[in-house]
Image (cartoon, rainbow, N blue to C red):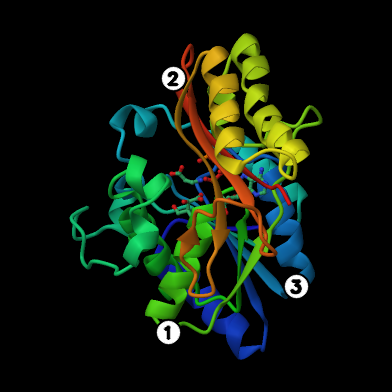
Amino acid sequence: MYLFKQKDDLERLLSTARKQGKRIGFVPTMGALHQGHLSLIAAAKENSDLVVCSIFVNPTQFNDPADFEKYPITIDQDIQLLTAAGNDVLFLPSVQEMYPKGLAPEMHYEFGPLETVLEGAHRPGHFQGVGQVVHKLLSLVAPDKLFMGQKDFQQCLIINRLIKLLDLKVELVICPTLRETDGLAMSSRNLRLNPTERQNALHISRALNYIKDHVHTAPLQALSDQGIHQLTDHGFEVDYLEMVSILPDGNISFPDTPGNDPLYAVVAARENSSGVRLIDNMQVN
Ligand SMILES: Nc1ncnc2c1ncn2[C@@H]1O[C@H](COP(=O)(O)OP(=O)(O)OP(=O)(O)O)[C@@H](O)[C@H]1O
Ligand SMILES: CC(C)(CO)[C@@H](O)C(=O)[O-]
Ligand code: BAL
């Protein structure tokens, strides 16, 4: 596996690969890799000739400084996992390499109402930060396909919109959420949970499964209220637990009743004893 820390070195290799007609697949991450990330690498390998993974804990998307400071970093293990998974190129830039002009926004992205609901409402500025870094990464890698996880439900919609705003040719491939055997969505932040907190975190996917089991027999509002109660009863602070659909224009709607469109329960909750904020979502109809 090639490991590049400088944009120039990465660009040189990619330019040669493109001249050879290779299709480039790209998997951006923040590291502390788990099987969920590796499933994206596997999907990229199946659908591309050259797979690039980036690991960069992007400071501009963290609204909570403590979350940034405590973000897990396991770079040696990440390199081993990527090598074993047959990843071709790892891009591991510094903050200076990604933001040579400093962290102040260079531009504002017009994401519209998508930016002000759910994650956007609870993490102000988060999606502008995601937009900044993904814009830079896509300009650099210029992949044919971009692989991202459904676990970050709203992020997928934001990136879809970013691709349209910038009129990029890249195809966004959304991959399913990988879960631990007991149902907990794999997440780098799970590493910050001790065994008791890790066990408690299971209540997130339980609440989503409860909603899925009752979606045709109870009003949606009652189900989200029940899900919120289940979580607060187990020591969570719930930022949101909502039932949503995706509108044809890529925005999010909040239906009162299940219709024909896919309906998703989306949740963000802080496990209070650890202070770790986790997100998850599940199609419930
Ligand atoms: N359980 C999972 N299954 C599939 N893809 C995932 C999973 N978790 C994360 N991803 C995807 O991996 C990519 C990189 O995400 P990231 O590095 O932030 O990992 P993460 O586990 O989501 O970390 P955290 O949620 O703690 O920030 C994103 O596209 C994300 O949606
Ligand atoms: C897309 C991303 C790599 C941008 O920093 C990050 O938000 C993530 O890991 O989901
Ligand atoms: N996986 C989304 C990145 C973040 O939480 O900042």
Element type at marker 3? helix
**Residue bearing mark 1:** 167
Residue sitting nearer the eye, 10 or 149: 149
Q: Quadrant of residue 25?
A: bottom right
Q: Earlier in the sequence, mark 2 or mark 1?
A: 1
Which kind of residue does numbered mark 1 sit on? Asp
Q: Quadrant of the N terminus?
A: bottom right
Residue 101 visible in the displayed image: yes
Q: Where 97 sits versus 126, above or below? A: below
Label 1, label 3: how far apart the Cα atoms are: 22 Å
- Disc 1 or 3, which lies upstream in sequence? 3
Q: Callout 2, which amino acid?
A: Gly
In front: 193, or 14? 193
Horizontal side of 70 relative to 104 (left or right) equals right
Report the side of 241 relative to 205 (left or right): left
Query: What's under tag 3, amino acid-wise?
Result: Asn
Q: Earlier in the sequence, mark 3 or mark 2?
A: 3
Q: State the separation of the CA atoms marked 2 and 1.
A: 39 Å
Residue 44 lies, in percent from the top left, at: 70, 65
The answer to whether the beta carbon of the residue marked 3 is less than 8 Å from any atom of ligand 1 is no
Residue mark closest to the camera, 1 vs 3: 1
Q: Which residue is mark 2?
A: 275
- Which of 285 and 34 lies nearest the eye of the viewer? 285
- Name the residue carrying label 3: 47
Q: Kindly state the secondary structure of the residue where label 1 is placed.
A: loop
- x and y, in percent, of residue 5 in the image: 44, 56
Q: Percent x, y for residue 234? A: 57, 13
